[in-house]
Image (cartoon, rainbow, N blue to C red):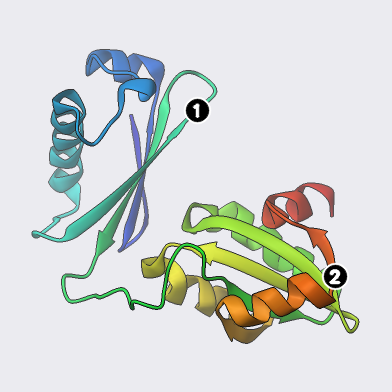
């Protein structure tokens, strides 16, 4: 098991197939209603708590399969006083504008290498000689992503109205996995 502290809000845990066998669970068996899953996660959290004090924080756990039948876990700590606004959902994109492909490519490379776990999906549009990157994120991650993206691009806004405008009036370059594809091909 490899535990990596990404920042004060996120911990990344890589579990091999051997690690999962030790806990007598597979990725496919993970289910929040399954008692075996709850015991497994509790055990993992106890290990994490040895180095990082959880202090009754709310957590959000994401699990992804790995190529070696292992599992990648992201444990995200949510401030107890944090509230996700009602107008925020997984279908509400953050929209950023980039003046050139070089800046966009540099941004996507940084996001891919360091922050991809924060992103649900992404799309890319071209309108009036500028690139528009739409990023769909978990509400608790929006501020982190915005801060990173504002270093390279211009924050246009958030929401379905401008997103719909782009879908109707601009050239769609990538309808999904924009960050991954830009990182791979540019």
Which quarter of the rendering shows the C terminus? bottom right
The image's mark for residue 101 is 2
**Residue 115 against residue 74 in the figure, above or below:** below
Q: Quick one: SS at disc 1? A: loop
**Residue at figure coordinates x 14%, y 47% from the top left:** 49
Q: Give the tally of numbered discs.
A: 2
**What's the residue at 73%, 79% (across, down)?**
165
User: Where in the figure is residue 106, as x and y percent of width and height?
Assistant: 74, 66
Residue 116 figure quarter: bottom right
Dot 1 crowding, Cα within 10 Å, few <14, some 14–19, many 20+: some
Asked whether, in this view, residue 156 is left or right of residue 127, the answer is left
**From the viewer's perspective, is 182 left or right of 164?**
right
Residue 71 position within the rendered picture, expressed as x and y whole percent measured from the top left: 40, 29
Name above or below for residue 101 compared with residue 110.
below
| Res 113 seen here | yes
Task: Choose the circle earlier in sequence order: 1 or 2.
Answer: 1
The residue indicated by pointer 1 is 66
- In which quadrant is the N terminus drawn? top left
Give how far across and how far down residue 157 sits, in percent: 58, 85
Q: Quadrant of residue 178?
A: bottom right
| Above/below status of 4 relative to 108 | above
Residue occupying the point 62% across, 81% down: 161
Q: Is residue 152 visible?
A: no
| Badge 2 element | helix
Q: Nearer the viewer, residue 70 or 176?
A: 176
Q: Is residue 71 left or right of residue 67?
A: left
């Amino acid at each position: 098991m490899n535990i990596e502290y990404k920042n004060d809000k996120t911990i990344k845990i890589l579990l091999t197939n051997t690690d999962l066998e030790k806990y007598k669970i597979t990725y496919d068996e993970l289910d929040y209603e399954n008692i075996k899953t709850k015991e497994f996660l509790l055990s993992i959290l106890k290990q994490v708590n040895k180095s990082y004090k959880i202090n009754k924080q709310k957590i959000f756990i994401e699990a992804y399969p790995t190529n070696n039948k292992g599992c990648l876990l992201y444990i995200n700590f949510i401030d107890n006083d944090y509230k996700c606004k009602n107008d925020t959902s997984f279908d509400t994109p953050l929209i950023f504008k980039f003046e050139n492909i070089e800046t966009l490519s540099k941004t996507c490379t940084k996001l891919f290498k360091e922050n991809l776990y924060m992103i649900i999906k992404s799309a890319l549009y071209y309108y009036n000689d500028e690139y528009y990157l739409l990023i769909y994120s978990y509400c608790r991650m929006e501020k982190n992503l915005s801060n990173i993206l504002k270093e390279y691009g211009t924050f246009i806004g958030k929401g379905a109205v401008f997103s719909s405008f782009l879908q109707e009036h601009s050239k769609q370059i990538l309808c999904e996995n924009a960050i991954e594809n830009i990182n791979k091909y540019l």
